[in-house]
């Protein structure tokens, strides 16, 4: 039978529940246990697929095509195992399921209420992953903070489930904040006391307190928190601000978080976690032998979470190359009226980021033209590939008015167009080309050298595709399709063979990069940037 760990948060949002959950999962996994993590989000959207990146950060896509919370990216990057639709549930999905059952008459005429119907559905979803006996431990993160109206049904479901499970079958971890008041020069425990009091009012007694802090917590503070929050003082865990999220598992080992959880759940495993490769990863990351500057040209650069998986993929690639990668954020709109040279000339590589809509598109196209002509290492993802095709058709093939149908439905040359199966779709949520699809790679290509394979599988999230009508013209002029979907003949990868490093992909490789397996395109892109810097100029 699976054991359950419930992670709640208090005082403020963005304390890092996802990182704590992922770190604990990594430690338990490193002790030989089979672990998975799931996230329950209180918002009423069915999934984050229709949310603006400014609203909620990036939308992470799983192998089975689920559009999920970005925390699932952390889970995969730490645990190196794929997640699925079952790992992320929202209030919208819960209510949708209950209402559909009511319409079908499944409740036999009963009045449908939050308790028991909504809470029962939450409990069913929490326990879904545990029914296969595939996992020893299932960590469940509850989004939001204690005290939010939206979170109340989830906390009630946790209260019920904790009572229904055996005494050693669940553990409640509460993540909270210990703020430091500079004027008083002391850490304050009152916000945590109030947060735990709020949690106790829902009927949940936390077993472990994880305290985010910018200053070390003294023995006296631990004792005070233990006394007022009704937990053992050894279960008051310090989560001090770290230089990198990848430091957190090692910090949690020092605090014995994994040992405490295993003790409370009566779990048996290795005496200490096997973390040698994790330490090697951090060692390479913190002791680089070289450095490069890589530009990230995007539309949402004001919010780092909008490109979370891309940024983390660069960290993985930096470690494997023992290189310090400095990411230079460049808003694509800033390149529309100004020459791209001023912002791009000192860079050693440029990534054109994915996105939606026409805002900032001309800036991306200007950047790509400069990169192509100057021989700067180029990497385009999804929209980045589509704009690379648009730029090539405009400036090399001289197809006046070439554009993506997404940007201009009346364009004379729709070199990127809406997929035929998307034409009649009106609903926005969950209707894109989503999830893992195969790609056949041409031997002798840059992509083949990168992947060392002729057949790969990568995750997608888009509606528009390269228009194959123009493919022969592009290939005759030098822009080659080196990756094709074997079933649909859709273009997946394009590259310029006479360029030092120029590759665009329709899929999202950043979604599969982990600490254990850095994505090969990111790793080779960073390597190309190192070589470009060493040579000074590519051409």
Image (cartoon, rainbow, N blue to C red):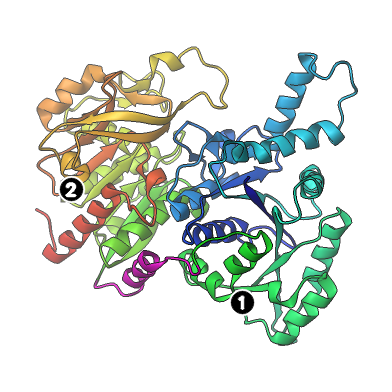
Residue 104, percent from left and from top: 76, 13
Residue 12 is at least partly visible in this image: yes
Q: Nearer the viewer, residue 128 or 368?
A: 128
Q: Is residue 453 left or right of residue 329?
A: left
Determine whether the residue tagged by mark 1 lies in a helix, strand or loop.
Answer: loop
Q: Residue at the location (44% across, 39% down)?
A: 355
Q: Which residue is mark 2?
A: 501
Position of 325 with respect to 145 (left or right) is: left
Q: Earlier in the sequence, mark 1 or mark 2?
A: 1
Q: Is 93 placed above or below 8 here?
A: above
Decide: marks 1, 2 in contact (CB < 8 A)?
no
Q: Residue at x 64, y 65 (%)?
A: 263
Q: Residue 208, position in %: x, y? A: 71, 66
Which SS class for mark 2? loop
Magenta stretch bounds: 271-289
Q: Nearer the viewer, residue 351 or 285?
A: 285
Res 234 quadrant in image: bottom right
Q: Quadrant of the N terminus?
A: top right
Q: Is residue 268 magenta?
A: no
- Would you say residue 183 is visible in this rendering? no
Image coordinates of residue 181 in percent, x first then y, are 72, 80
The 10 Å Cα crowd at callout 1, few under 14, some 14 to 19, many 20 or more, is some
Residue at label 1? 214
Disc 1 to disc 2, how far (Cα)?
42 Å
Question: Could you tell me which residue is drawn at 31 percent across and 57 percent down?
Answer: 317
Closer to us: 409 or 134: 134
Residue 336: name its quadrant.
top left
Vertical relation: 447 (above or below) 518: above
Q: Is residue 275 magenta?
A: yes
Locate residue 306, reporting x and y percent.
50, 48
């Amino acid at each position: 039978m699976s054991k359950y760990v419930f992670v709640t948060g208090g005082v403020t949002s963005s304390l890092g529940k996802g990182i704590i959950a992922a770190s604990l999962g990594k430690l338990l996994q490193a002790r030989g246990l089979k672990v998975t993590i799931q996230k329950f989000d209180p918002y009423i959207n069915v999934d984050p697929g229709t949310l603006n990146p400014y609203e909620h950060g990036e939308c992470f896509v799983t192998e089975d095509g689920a559009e999920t919370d970005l925390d699932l990216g952390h889970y995969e990057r730490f645990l190196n195992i794929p997640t699925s639709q079952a790992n992320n549930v929202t209030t919208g999905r819960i209510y949708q399921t209950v209402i559909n059952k009511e319409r079908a008459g499944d409740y036999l005429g009963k009045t449908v209420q939050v308790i028991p119907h909504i809470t029962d559905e939450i409990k069913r979803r929490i326990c879904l992953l545990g029914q296969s006996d595939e996992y020893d431990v299932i960590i469940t993160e509850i989004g939001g903070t204690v005290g939010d109206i939206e979170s109340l049904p989830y906390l009630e479901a946790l209260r019920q489930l904790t009572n229904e499970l055996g005494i050693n079958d669940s553990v409640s971890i509460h993540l909270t904040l210990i703020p430091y008041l500079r004027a008083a020069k002391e850490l304050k425990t009152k916000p945590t006391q109030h947060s735990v009091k709020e949690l106790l009012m829902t009927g949940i007694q936390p077993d472990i307190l994880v305290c985010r802090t910018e200053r070390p917590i003294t023995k006296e503070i631990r004792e005070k928190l233990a006394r007022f929050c009704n937990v053992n003082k050894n279960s008051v865990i310090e989560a001090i601000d770290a230089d990198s999220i990848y430091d957190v598992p090692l910090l949690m080992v020092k605090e014995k978080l994994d040992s405490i959880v295993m003790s409370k759940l009566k779990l048996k495993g290795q005496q200490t976690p096997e973390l040698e490769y994790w330490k090697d990863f951090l060692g390479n990351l913190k002791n680089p032998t070289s450095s490069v500057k890589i530009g990230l040209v995007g539309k949402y650069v004001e919010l780092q979470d909008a490109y979370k998986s891309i940024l983390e993929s660069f960290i993985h690639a930096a470690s494997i190359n023992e290189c310090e990668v400095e990411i230079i954020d460049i808003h694509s709109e800033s390149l529309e009226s100004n020459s791209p040279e001023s912002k791009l000339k000192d860079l050693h590589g440029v990534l054109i980021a994915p996105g939606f809509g026409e805002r900032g598109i001309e800036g991306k196209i200007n950047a790509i033209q400069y990169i192509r002509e100057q021989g700067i290492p180029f990497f385009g993802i999804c929209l980045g590939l589509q704009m690379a095709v648009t730029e090539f058709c405009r400036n090399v093939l001289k197809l006046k008015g070439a554009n993506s149908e997404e940007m201009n439905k009346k364009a004379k040359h729709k070199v990127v167009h809406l997929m035929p199966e998307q034409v009649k779709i009106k609903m926005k949520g969950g209707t894109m080309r989503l999830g893992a699809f195969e790609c056949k790679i041409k031997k002798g290509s840059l992509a083949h050298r990168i992947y060392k394979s002729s057949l790969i599988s990568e995750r997608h999230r888009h509606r528009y595709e390269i228009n194959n009508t123009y493919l022969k013209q592009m290939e005759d002029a030098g822009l080659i399709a080196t990756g094709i979907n074997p079933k649909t003949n859709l273009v997946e990868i394009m590259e310029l063979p006479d360029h030092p490093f120029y590759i665009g992909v329709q899929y999202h490789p950043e979604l599969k990069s982990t600490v254990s397996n850095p994505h090969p395109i990111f790793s080779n892109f960073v390597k190309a940037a190192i070589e470009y810097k060493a040579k000074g100029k590519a051409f």
